[in-house]
Structures are given as C-alpha cells and as structure tokens.
Amino acid sequence: MFFVVLASLFLGKLSDRIGRRKPFVWLASAMQGVAAWLVWQRRDTRGARVALGVFIVQLTLNGLWTWMFFAWRQGGLAFAEILVLLALILATIVLFWRIRSLAGVLLLPYAGWVAFASALTFAIWRRNPTLLG
C-alpha cells in the first residue's frame, strides 16, 4: 500500500509541474487511493494481487499520458495510450468489484473522467495536427 500512495504522490507532483489539476481530479485521486486500500486490506483474497497489479499499471499509464500529450506533444500516441488506460481502468473496476464492491464503485468517477479526457485528447489532437503530431 505504501508503494501505491508513494506512486500516487509522485505522479501527482509530476502532473502538477506540467499542468494544474482541478479539484475533481484530486477527489478522484483520493477515491482511487481508498479503493486500492480497500482491496489491499483483502490482499490474501483470490485475485487481489492481480487487481492491485493492474491498478499500478493503469496508474503508471495515467502519469505517462500527461508526458505524452503535454510535454512530448504526441497527440496520436497520447490518444492511443489513453484508450489503453481507459480499458485498464475498466478492468480494474471489475477486478476490484469482485474483491470488494465499494472499491469498484469508487473508481467509476475516475473512469468517467478518463472517458471525457479521451474525447478531449482526440478532439484537440485532430484540430491541432501540426502542434501535436
């Protein structure tokens, strides 16, 4: 659990250097942390380690998207990556739900946010092809 909290803080600080986060994103991040903690509490349950592993992978991709889109200006790559991220978030919701339903529910706003961010990523990339590759 310590690693998850540390990774969340690191990726949050990294994102803050590139762009300001909105209060909703902080709330969604806190809900992710609580969801992971709820599953971590049942880490001896069948599937918990896999669920937490998928959670960490999607958390890493979340941080990577920020770099791809804002720092490296790779719009097409960022769009492809955010679709993979969204798929992993949905997988995490299902895996968390199987272990503790509240943990899955807590990730739903995050999935909604990333779905919205996916649409924005695509729209901005397509309207700015020279700027975002």
Image (cartoon, rainbow, N blue to C red):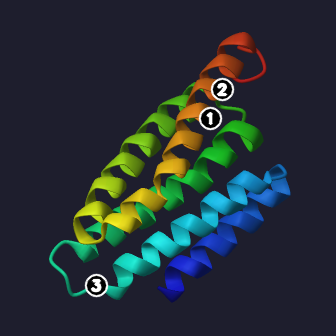
Measure the alpha-carbon separation of dots 2 and 1. Answer: 5 Å
* Amino acid beneath label 1: Ala
Q: Spot the residue most to the left.
A: 46
State the SS at label 2. Answer: helix
Vertical comparison of 65 with 1: above or below: above
Query: Picture coordinates of residue 86 (x, y %)?
Result: 44, 41
Vertical comparison of 28 with 52: above or below: above
Residue for badge 3: 43
How packed is label 1: few (under 14 Cα within 10 Å), some, or many (20 or more)?
some
Return the disc, 3 or 1, that comes first in the chain's sequence: 3
* Amino acid beneath label 3: Arg
Residue for badge 1: 117
Return the disc, 2 or 3, that comes first in the chain's sequence: 3
Query: Mark 2 touching mark 1, by CB under 8 A?
Result: yes
Measure the alpha-carbon separation of dots 3 and 1. Answer: 31 Å
Residue for badge 2: 120
Q: In the figure, residue 96 lies in which quadrant?
A: bottom left
Q: Is residue 41 left or right of residue 129?
A: left
State the SS at label 3. Answer: loop
What's the residue at 19%, 71% (across, down)?
A: 47
Name the foreground residue: 20 vs 78.
20
State the SS at label 1. Answer: helix
What's the residue at 48%, 31% (across, down)?
A: 80
What's the residue at 28%, 54% (across, down)?
A: 94
